[in-house]
Structures are given as C-alpha cells and as structure tokens.
Image (cartoon, grey):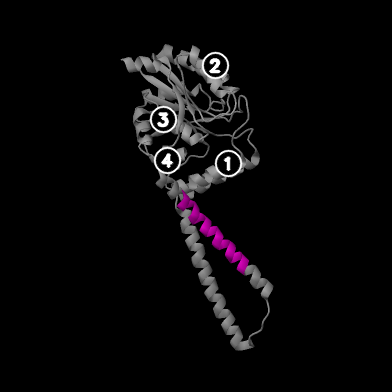
Amino acid sequence: MEKITVIVPCYNEEETIPLFITEIEKVYDSMHEKYDIDMEYLFVNDGSKDRTAEVLEEYAAKNPRVSYIRFSRNFGKEAAMYAGLDNSDADYTVIIDADLQDPPELIEEMYRILKTEPEYDCVASRRYTRTGEPPIRSWFAKRFYSLMAKISKTEIVDGARDFRMMSRQMVDAIMSLSECNRFSKGIFSWVGFETKWLAFENRERAGGQTKWSFWGLLIYAIDGVVAFSTAPLAVSSIIGIIFCILSFIGVCFIFIRALIFGDKVEGWPSLACIMCFIAGIQLFCNGISGIYLSKTYTEAKRRPQYIAKKIHRGTLKDKKDEE
C-alpha cells in the first residue's frame, strides 16, 4: 500500500484548517477506494499567534491521518515546507496551502499522472488567471517572472505555485540541498526531473487574511533573484565601468574647454546634482554586493532551518514504524 504525505504550512490558519480537512478527507476517501492508498496530513504550524495549535491538537486526537509539527517561533513558509519534506517518508509527497486557494481535488489527478506516465517525477500547478488579486501585485508578479526568465538559467514558470506532488526520488534530491537561503520555486526547478504542469483558475481564500504583504513579496522576490542569479552583480559592475568612462570623457571635456575658453568657476549646482547621483549609484551597487555578502554570512553560520517545539505523528506513522 503506497503512502502520500500532504504537507500543509500553516500560519494563523485556525479558520481554514477545519475547511481544509473537510475537503482533503473527500480526496482521501475517493483515492483510498480507487487506489488503496494511505494518506497523512502533515501540518506545519509556523509559530502561529492564534488557535492554530489548539485546532490541530483537537483534530489529531480524533483523526489518525492528522499529524503536525509545531515550531518554537515563526521561521517562515520556506522553513515550514523544508520541515515537512524533512519529516516525510512517503512514496509521494504533496505541498499545499491550507487556505484552499490550491484545489485539493487536483491531488487525485496528480497521483494518476505519476502512476500512468512514469516519465514524470513531479506534477505541479500554476495559475493561468489572477482574478481577485490586486492589479499592482499581479503586475509586479508578472514582471518578476519575466525578469527571472532573462537573468536566470533556472526556469521558473509564470504563475507557478508551491502546490505539487513529487516522487520519493525528487524529494530526496531536494533535501540534499541544505542551503539556508531557500527559494523553493527555484529549487524545485534546479534539481531537474520531469515536471508536468496543471493549470487552474485563481481562487479566493476560504477564510482568514493573507499573510503576504506587498513588502514581504518584494523581499521574497529579491531572495529569489539572489538565490538563482548573479546578474545583479554583473549589472553593478557594468554600471561602474560606464560611469568611469563618462568621468574620463568629462575630464577631457573640462580640460579642453579650459584651454580654449579659460577656466570659469560656474555650474556648481549641476555639479552637486551629478555628484549626488553618482553617490546614489555607488550606494546602490554596494547594496547589491551587500545582499550577496549577507546571504553568504547566513550560510556560513549553518543555523538550523527550523526548531520544532513539538512533533506529533498520527497512528499511520506509528503502524509503519512497527512494521
């Protein structure tokens, strides 16, 4: 009997967890009847401030398929996904959000594809519409995917979600990458393996509020660029070379003008503006270098991706250990 572990990162999701479990139970009932599989729902509580922990404990007490990992504090969604993969020993592993923006019913189709089309090791999902999303966020998201396509050798599909099903081999490959600065969308692509994409229409959250602010998404995008491209460093170097050339041309112009027309002390306001502009460019380039340096510093410390305060595995896990 094959096993599927469904990893569900959670941060303040007390409203959506009951709704999610209701929907995923329907998927389990259908798949268990058709394919005779076991399924585990592994919730990763990422330092939630609401009653997420209590809700998970209540469901775990009455449902043997519910397991959970409770972090000691908020480590972020990337750490939550890593923890789920780190604790998954299933034949197939699914990552899905608890807010039901990712349709759980696609899990059955993903499993069918992996079983009937052995050339694939992963079935991933992507949104082909962004209905209901703020227009400015949609615009910046499209620009991000377009930028990544140009500056990175790692393919990141426009509208790609973390929602996917992966084979055991692919999960092991992902876990072999122990880097601290994780950008999973890039990692999923970097490890290779054949991936089939399933498109679906964007859905609204089933409850609660989104945890992603515009600023948080911007920082996440910067992390993705830094993790899978060194192009910003090259750009800063090119900018430095261009300004050196312009400075040399400017010196030559001033020298020749002084020889022909004499040295006149004028134009200091424009000179001050130019100096401020160049100083801003220098700080911008230093900032790019600083980001890469800070990521290197973080990696060098080798701190753990997460610290688990409590890990509860359902009776399905216990039975497998006894066997």
Viewer-nearest of discs 4 and 2: 4
Viewer-nearest of discs 1 and 2: 1
Q: Residue at x 51, y 59 (%)?
A: 286
Q: Residue at x 38, y 19 (%)?
A: 3
Question: For the residues marked 4 and 1, what is the alpha-carbon distance in whole angstroms?
Answer: 22 Å
For badge 4, the amino acid type reads: Arg
Q: Residues within 10 Å of mark 2 (few under 14, many from 20)?
A: few
Left or right: residue 87 versus residue 12 is left
Q: Earlier in the sequence, mark 1 or mark 2?
A: 2
Whether residues under marks 2 and 3 lie with C-beta atoms below 8 angstroms apart, the answer is no
Magenta segment: 275-294
Q: Which residue is mark 3?
A: 85
Q: Which residue is mark 1?
A: 216
Q: Which residue is mark 2?
A: 22
Give how far across and how far down residue 73 sits, in percent: 52, 33
- Determine if the magenta segment contains residue 40: no
Residue 242 visible at all: yes
Viewer-nearest of discs 4 and 1: 4
Viewer-nearest of discs 3 and 4: 4
Give how far across and how far down residue 181 sits, in percent: 45, 43
Q: Relative to residue 283, is residue 120 depicted above or below?
A: above
Q: Earlier in the sequence, mark 4 or mark 2?
A: 2
For badge 1, the amino acid type reads: Gly
Question: For the residues marked 1 and 2, what is the alpha-carbon distance in whole angstroms?
Answer: 30 Å
The dot on residue 303 is 4
Give how far across and how far down residue 255 sits, in percent: 57, 83
